[in-house]
């Protein structure tokens, strides 16, 4: 017999016998083992994404008492604007200016607290000065014109920006917050426009129609939200479409009704058009304020004084309605 050669290979006879007993099956490769944990691992993030997609958006509830309170506040503003315009005589516009100045202070408080501009004390002080100058010019100027109010607004805006340049943290916010400053100063000055209109032809009637239509629209919309806030405009905004539509319809109807009682150049058709424009302006401002509040609350920047953010909508609406009344009086009627 020949001598057997030594087996250096790791596959010796014992290993071959073990494979034979196993039926010649190959050991499982690593491909299947690698795939199983990958499928399990990939399923976890997929399930997490599905959970995030299925997560419902929180619906902000509508508080009935608050909605009714805002409706009452809007109604008081409307009545004040209408009665002030009706009782303004050629030699007795100072009482109307005093009432308007009180509304300007409310507007200033609400919008400064809600928007939080840089250097709020300086901005508020400049805005108070703008309100006093605008009211004084509206009552005592030789000619009832809009340009003195425009120059007063621009001067107050520049002065407010200068007051925001002294501290470093205020200067850093200046480029992002100048729009808020302009809205505060311009809104304060806009409330003096009805005083100017009472000194112009057809101006008093235009103020009455615009203020009444906007007031009816806001009161009806807010009161409807307290009873039937559906369908919701947005989950984060506690307003309903039914109230907005119903308020717009009744506000326009009130403008048409007033147009039938007022003298030339008002007619029911012109009263309806003027009322519709006032209603649209009031609703747009009010809803824009609501969406702005919702955005600040989601960002964690809601103002601490909660009364201010709820008065902001009606006050901003009547400020812009005053400017719209001047434009309608000169370009439409």
Image (cartoon, rainbow, N blue to C red):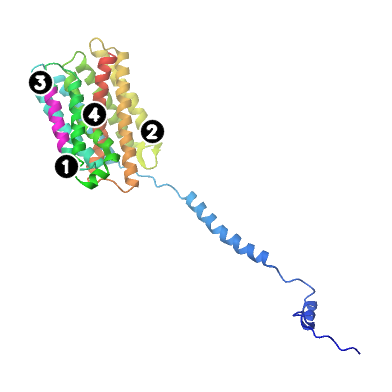
Image quadrant containing the C terminus:
top left
Give SS at disc 4: helix
What is the CA distance from the residue labelled 2 to the residue labelled 4?
Answer: 23 Å
Quadrant housing residue 267:
top left
- The answer to which image quadrant residue 4 occupies is bottom right
Determine crowd level at label 3: few under 14, some 14-19, many 20+ residues with C-alpha closer than 10 A: few
Q: Which callout, 1 or 2, points at the residue further toward the start of the chain? A: 1
Q: Is residue 274 above or below residue 301?
A: above
Circle 2 sits on which residue?
Answer: 241
**Disc assigned to residue 121:** 1
- Quickly name the residue at label 3: 140
Q: Nearer the viewer, residue 108 or 216?
A: 108
Residue 97 locus on image (x, y percent): 12, 26
Q: Is residue 233 above or below residue 43?
A: above
For disc 1, the neighbor class at 10 Å (few under 14, some 14 to 19, many from 20) is some
Q: Earlier in the sequence, mark 1 or mark 4?
A: 1
Q: Are marks 2 and 4 in contact (CB under 8 Å)?
A: no
Q: Is residue 131 magenta?
A: yes
Q: Nearer the viewer, mark 2 or mark 3?
A: 3
State which tag comes first along the sequence, 3 or 4.
3
Q: Position of residue 326 (x, y in %)?
A: 24, 20
Task: Pick whichever of labels 2 and 3 is earlier in the sequence.
Answer: 3
Q: Secondary structure at mark 2?
A: helix
Q: Nearer the viewer, residue 92 or 136?
A: 136
Q: Say which residue label 4 marks.
A: 319
The residues bearing labels 1 and 4 have C-alpha atoms spaced at a distance of 22 Å
Asked whether the residues under the numbered discs 1 and 2 touch, taking CB atoms below 8 Å apart as contact, a structural biologist would say no
Q: Residue 261 at what x, y percent from top left? A: 24, 13
Q: Which residues are magenta?
A: 125-137
């Amino acid at each position: 017999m020949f001598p057997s050669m030594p087996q250096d290979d790791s596959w010796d006879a014992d290993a071959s016998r073990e494979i034979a007993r196993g039926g010649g099956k190959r050991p499982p490769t690593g491909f299947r083992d690698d795939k199983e944990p990958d499928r399990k691992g990939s399923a976890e993030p997929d399930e997490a994404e599905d959970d995030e997609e299925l997560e419902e958006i929180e619906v902000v509830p509508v508080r009935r008492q608050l909605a009714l309170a805002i409706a009452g506040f809007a109604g008081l503003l409307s009545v004040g604007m209408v009665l002030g315009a009706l009782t303004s005589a050629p030699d007795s516009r100072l009482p109307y200016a005093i009432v308007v100045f009180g509304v300007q202070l409310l507007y200033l408080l609400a919008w400064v607290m809600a928007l939080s501009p840089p250097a709020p004390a300086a901005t508020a002080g400049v805005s108070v000065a703008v309100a006093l100058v605008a009211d004084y010019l509206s009552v005592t100027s030789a000619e009832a014109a809009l340009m003195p109010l425009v120059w007063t607004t621009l001067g107050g805006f520049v002065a407010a920006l200068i007051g925001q340049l002294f501290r470093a943290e205020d200067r850093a916010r200046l480029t992002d917050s100048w729009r808020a400053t302009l809205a505060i100063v311009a809104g304060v000055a806009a409330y003096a426009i009805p005083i100017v209109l009472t000194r112009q032809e057809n101006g008093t009637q235009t103020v009455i129609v615009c203020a009444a239509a906007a007031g009816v629209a806001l009161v009806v919309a807010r009161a409807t939200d307290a009873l039937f806030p559906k369908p919701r405009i947005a989950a984060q905004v506690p307003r309903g479409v039914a109230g907005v539509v119903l308020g717009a319809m009744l506000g326009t109807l009130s403008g048409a009704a007033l147009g039938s009682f007022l003298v030339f150049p008002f007619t029911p058709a012109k009263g309806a058009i003027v009322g519709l424009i006032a209603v649209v302006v009031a609703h747009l401002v009010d809803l824009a304020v609501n969406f702005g509040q919702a955005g600040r609350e989601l960002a964690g920047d809601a103002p601490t004084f909660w009364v201010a953010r709820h008065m902001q909508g009606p006050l901003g609406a009547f400020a812009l309605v005053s400017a719209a009344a001047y434009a309608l009086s000169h370009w439409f009627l």
